[in-house]
Image (cartoon, rainbow, N blue to C red):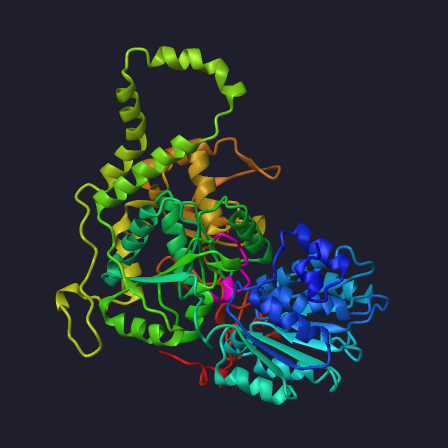
Amino acid sequence: MINPFQLLGISDDVVNAIKELGFEQPTPIQEQAIPVLLQGNNDFVGLAQTGTGKTAAFGLPLLELIDFKSNKPQALILCPTRELCLQIANDLKNFSKNLSNANIVAVYGGASIVQQLREIRNGVQIVVATPGRMLDIIGRKAIDFSNVKHVVLDEADEMLNMGFQEDINEILSTTPEDKKTWLFSATMPAEVRRIAKNYMDSPVELTMGTKNSGNANIEHEYYVVRAREKYDALKRIVDFNPDIFGVVFCKTKLDTQEVAENLIKDGYNADALHGDLSQQQRDKVMKRFRDRSMQLLVATDVAARGIDVNNVTHVINYALPDEIESYTHRSGRTARAGKSGISICIINAKETGKIRQLERIIGKPFTKAEVPGGFEVCEKQLFSLIHKVHNVEVNESQIEQYIPRIMDEFKDLEKEEVIKRFASLEFNRFLEYYRDAPDLNVTPYERGERGERGERSERGERGERRERGERRGSARDGSYTRLFINLGAVDEFTRGDMLSFVCNHAKISGKSVGKIDLKGVFSFFEVENEVVDKVFGGFKSVEFNGRDVRIERSGEAESQGFGGGGGRREGGRSFGARRDSNGGGFRDFSGKSRSDRSERSDRSGGFNKKESSRRKKW
């Protein structure tokens, strides 16, 4: 039987490779785009949602058009983030593994440019790049694009949102005029349409679904709560979905880190992904998420671009995005490859009008859902446990030796009593936590209505963070002690890692840990006064990577020169950027200007002023 991809014109070597990856039937965009792109003589505009198979739609025909006998660059793929850059490059390497002499290089900031230059010098046919780092390499005259026949602009709308218009112009000016340009985008704002007009000649256009529409397999829900109770609502929604495997979106890097830390302290398997993490830290977080050893990934919009993880069940908008189109990208993290998913918005009463705008943009209604009550959560968790017990796979050979002792332990209990006690192990925990749990739901009101002032739903995120901080206490009010540890970011620790490291060795709860101030080779963290002795006791003989781990009170450490400086302080957190002495923007501790192009491609949320005026706000 002929493989469907062979019928589209893909060669046997590539078909055999993608069959091993589980590709059986082409997606709609692959089915329609591949035959057109295989002709190789047309510019192309493809509009389709994330998760519909766009990488294979342009990657498979590209592999058929490349001359792999030549080691010169023949195709350039530009994308907005390093995560997406790595994803595309890895996919193409997997697709081409049966092709001899196929060389694909990923070029992105945050990794060694020396290594990337070495790979380019060794010969490459396809370059996958973020705009900033690509400009750096072009500036070094380290690559020759004179033989480039095809340029792919993937996630074009997001590249424009991030302010890469000028960079794209400069990069494309180094490529031949007779090249063919393939543009792929999830949405089609006016700026993307302008790119098609400027760079293409009578392009073939393919639209899957309605422009700017959402994936048909995604259900959209929204919950209306007080701003100060948004975090409590998030936890309750997560608890009501025991098998959740999702992405939580926040607006800023600070919010992302704070929500992730709070989730970890409250016992959830979560971590943060944002632009302040090193490439090694981001890879570590993404590996845990892909391996499903993490339940919740808390991310900013830009950092989450390129997250191609199957079976994500939920996308939770902890804060609505600033740009309407970004919602489409966020929700596209779920319901990938034909699966179904749920996109949830947690809003305050004044944001109901934004939900109506989203309904008009994506052409789908949102369901107003009620934040579940404590009893509903306990009931859901109980039956989730029962379902898991009923379906668990029993390892007969290993468990058999323990059965006599187990039966002896339960000999004085009836079957019903054993079941009740077993179920209560998990049920009692949630029952205690949600005892007398308040109703978090708020009646929404549309724009123009005053609403109930007592709800103060207009409280901003900053006030919400401040209020949560006051509830937890801090070293300043005397309830916490600030400690020094000789481990930091250079040891590839994130705040979440540090929290787990301290709790595991000191045998304390995450709720006993306050602010964590992560530095380069050391860090500071706060713990409740009552557990200070446990921390010192737990770290008496701990080693990390062959060296002793040292814990001291912050005053003693600072007297030895380990200050809390390196940036201004705000609310106990350290910001690693300070104003350039020349007044020209911000510089990090290495002295490099953040306006450096190689970093701009990896910065979360950065954009040119010229582009910002064109971005579609609420």
Q: Residue at x 41, y 36 (%)?
A: 535
The quarter of the picture where residue 139 lies is: bottom right
Q: Nearer the viewer, residue 62 or 225?
A: 62
Asked whether the viewer can see residue 112, the reply is: no
Up the image or down, 543 lies above or below 176; here it is above
202 left or right of 244 in image: right
Picture coordinates of residue 57, whole percent (x, y): 63, 67
Picture coordinates of residue 598, whole percent (x, y): 62, 71
377 left or right of 534 in image: left
Q: Nearer the viewer, residue 133 or 356?
A: 356
Q: Residue furthest front?
A: 1
Q: Quadrant of the C terminus?
A: bottom left
- Residue 602 in the magenta stretch? The answer is no
- Residue 304 in the magenta stretch? The answer is yes
- Magenta: main secondary structure equals loop
Picture coordinates of residue 573, whole percent (x, y): 40, 58
85 left or right of 439 in image: right
Picture coordinates of residue 238, whole percent (x, y): 34, 49
Q: Quadrant of the N terminus?
A: bottom right
Q: Nearer the viewer, residue 555 or 266?
A: 266
Q: Residue at x 27, y 16 (%)?
A: 414
The quarter of the picture where residue 150 lies is: bottom right
Q: Residue at x 27, y 44 (%)?
A: 377
Number of marks: 0
Asked whether the viewer can see residue 158, the reply is: yes
Q: Nearer the viewer, residue 499 or 68?
A: 68
> What segment carries the magenta color?
301-311
264 left or right of 453 in image: right
The quarter of the picture where residue 258 lies is: bottom left
Up the image or down, 483 lies above or below 9; here it is above
Q: Residue at x 30, y 21 (%)?
A: 418
